Amino acid sequence: MEVLKIATAGSVDDGKSTLIGRILYDTKSLTTDKLEAIEKTSKQKGYDYLDFSLATDGLVAEREQGITIDVAHIYFSTANKSYIVADTPGHVEYTRNMVTGASTSQASIILIDARKGVIEQTYRHFFINNLLRIKDIVVAINKMDLVDYSEEVFNAIKKDFEALMEQREYSDQNISFIPISALKGDNVVNASDKMPWYKSKTVLGHLEQLDKKNIFNSGTARFPVQAVVRPKTEDFHDFRGYQGKVYGGDLNVGDDIVVLPSKTTSKIKEIYFYNEKYDTAARRSSVTITLEDDVNISRGDMIVKSDDLPQINKSLNAVVCWMDSTALKPNNKYTVQHGVNKVLAIVTDIEHKINPDFSGIDKEAAQLEVNDIALVSFKLNRPIFSDRFQDHRTNGSFILIDNNTNNTVGAGFIQ
Amino acid sequence: MKSTAIINSLENEAIYILREVAAQFERPVLLFSGGKDSITLVRLAQKAFYPGKIPFPLMHIDTGHNFPETIEFRDRLVKELGLELIVRNVQESIDKGKVVEEKGKYASRNMLQTGTLLDAIEEFKFDACIGGARRDEEKARAKERIFSVRDDFGQWDEKNQRPELFDMLNGQIDLGQNVRVFPISNWTELDVWSYIAKEGFEIPSIYFAHQRKVFFRDGMIWSFDDDVVYREEDEVCQELTVRFRTVGDMSCTAAVLSDAADLASVVQEIRDSSISERGARIDDKRSDSAMEKRKQQGYF
Ligand SMILES: Nc1nc2c(ncn2[C@@H]2O[C@H](COP(=O)(O)OP(=O)(O)O)[C@@H](O)[C@H]2O)c(=O)[nH]1
């Protein structure tokens, strides 16, 4: 079954948890025991409605503070798709969580409180969705029940958001506006009878009709080698296979390929998934391939089609989202993990900081603090084989690792 | 033209993760309980490394309260695939006085497993433990990473987790630390069952409807076995047709009434079911934060 990953963004109290809880409830994904727990807690709290946000709020610390503090994953499915929702918090200080959640998502839902309209937070949410090249965005204008389900309110907010869209860098992004009440269930899974003026799809209805064609950018095939398999058993005496996941496009038996960094050329001989042979290794499948020639290949090398090579560079220019409490400074050293390849990197320059709300850049920035976004250049000790992020979401991104703490401290989008 | 496009994206993801574990760590181990999730992991590993062998051993932390069917199944699978199996017993930890057996109506050895596990990790110097936990199981699990770093005491610090971006898995750790790896994080219970049914994997017989001596408590059905499962005098035993949705510790795993005797009917039953599988585990009901607390102490 097809899996669709969705990120959510909204400020505290815009109703994100309620929306997700409502989707779970209306798609009958809440089990009896969970529903009973929600009923019980709602009653304890003295509510006269069901507090669906309880379906998603996970950790104790969070429950105590009453806010979502990290990325949580929620699962539900319909007859035609499985959904994974990355629930990411919307406060200012959690840019990193939103970037994290959005990095694995193909679609996203941005929530706006109908009473507040487009606020500064909305700018940030949209900015990050745009930076991460999310293909499909639903702008859900929530709490319509509190503004008398007014078409004027909806239109005014839509207009403000459209003004914001003019500033975006990446325009190949489908954006739909949907007026909802997460609490009452209007236009979430079921169409509302309170807003006859809205004729288009519900939130779930919209997600249901998305398919591979409109959520994946097609690109070029990249095959980073995870491991080389040489079983040396009787049956597979001379077998030498390259294991990895195909990104961006398909690979076929007979394709002319180049191995990087050695630039050795060969042809794809066989494609295996487990013990079965295939003609085509489709994007995102984990396969084992063999080549016509004996080539010296190791983990971290990349196999690509000969007619479409990536950049092979020992320097790197990238938009970085900084995620650590220790600042990034020029001359600092990090490990760059680009797919399965790791190289050492030194920061050569912070060119400018980018305000994550479309308000421009700051050229004076001397260092990056947590949640800062900036254009940074690096020098590498070995080359990586990369594409620009705008051309290739997977091969155009990397993470930064601090070798003192081993933590993942930043995400990079190659320019 | 035969294309791998037909292959389920969850399966591709799990294979990618398993290959990363093998490449990034020195001494990985697959924690094997004999349940459907760990069987799925073993089968995925078989696919991931083919035509090579699975490059790590399995380890079973045996509570001593297992269903006999599970143990019989475990030994058969290990033999079939020619794998190395390590078994460490909770009973041994109790005998050595390292942990104390719980008493009373809700006593279980689930909590005690943690101590035995941490000792085994220490003993074998494992740096990565592959587990079959899924994020849909429980709210606290929903925030678990695919590579989840544990400190020298095996503890999980949920506020200090590494962000996981794109497909990139950062397995860099210091000596003494280890990582819990969850390749089927993104699978739901139904995904697991559908996969097992599609592939026709063999699983222990207790997952299918069978006649069993049981008794009722708190509206749940417990296996009758006075050696392992605590029972009050007035809790009377009867014979019913039941099956289990998980195969944990007998003393805290409840059965469900069911006629589902084959994989297809089990999948149908899960699809129609309105109770989550953890709903049948008594120790999670003790408190809403039960799981999170256990995880912080090193439970997998
Ligand atoms: N009237 C109304 N209240 C809502 C709606 N959606 C959410 N709320 C309320 O807004 C508050 C915050 O919602 P919650 O889902 O916790 O927000 P989050 O912080 O974005 O997850 C709660 O009291 C909800 O009951 C809605 O559509 N209408």
Image (cartoon, coloured by chain):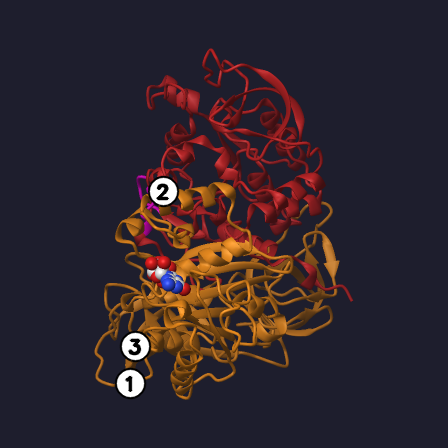
Residue A359, x across and y down, in percent: 30, 85
User: Relative to A349, is B245 above or below?
Assistant: above
Q: Does residue B144 appear in this view?
A: no
Marks 2 and 3: same chain? no
> How far apart are labels 2 and 1 at the CA level?
42 Å
| Mark 1: secondary structure | strand
Of the chain colours in the picture, the one used for chain A is orange
Q: Quadrant of the N terminus of chain A?
A: bottom right
Is residue A95 something one can see in this rendering? Answer: yes
For residue A120, the mark is 3
Q: Nearer the viewer, mark 2 or mark 3?
A: 3
What chain letter is assigned to the residue under label 2?
B
Q: Is residue B156 magenta?
A: yes
Q: Which residue, given by chain and number where applicable, does mark 1 sit on?
A: A361
Span colored in magenta: B150-158
Q: Residue B50: percent from the left, percent from the top?
A: 65, 49
Q: Is mark 1 within 8 Å of ligand 1?
A: no
Mark 1 and mark 3 on one chain:
yes
Query: In the depicted view, which residue is nearer to us: B12 or A380?
Result: B12
**For the residue marked with disc 2, what is the amino acid?**
Glu
Is B271 on the left-hand or right-hand side of A314? Answer: right
Q: Whole-Å distance between the Cαs marked 1 and 3?
A: 17 Å
Q: Colour of chain B?
A: red
Residue pointed to by mark 2: B292
Please tell me whether mark 2 sits on a helix, a strand or a loop.
helix
| Quadrant of the image occupied by residue B116 | top left
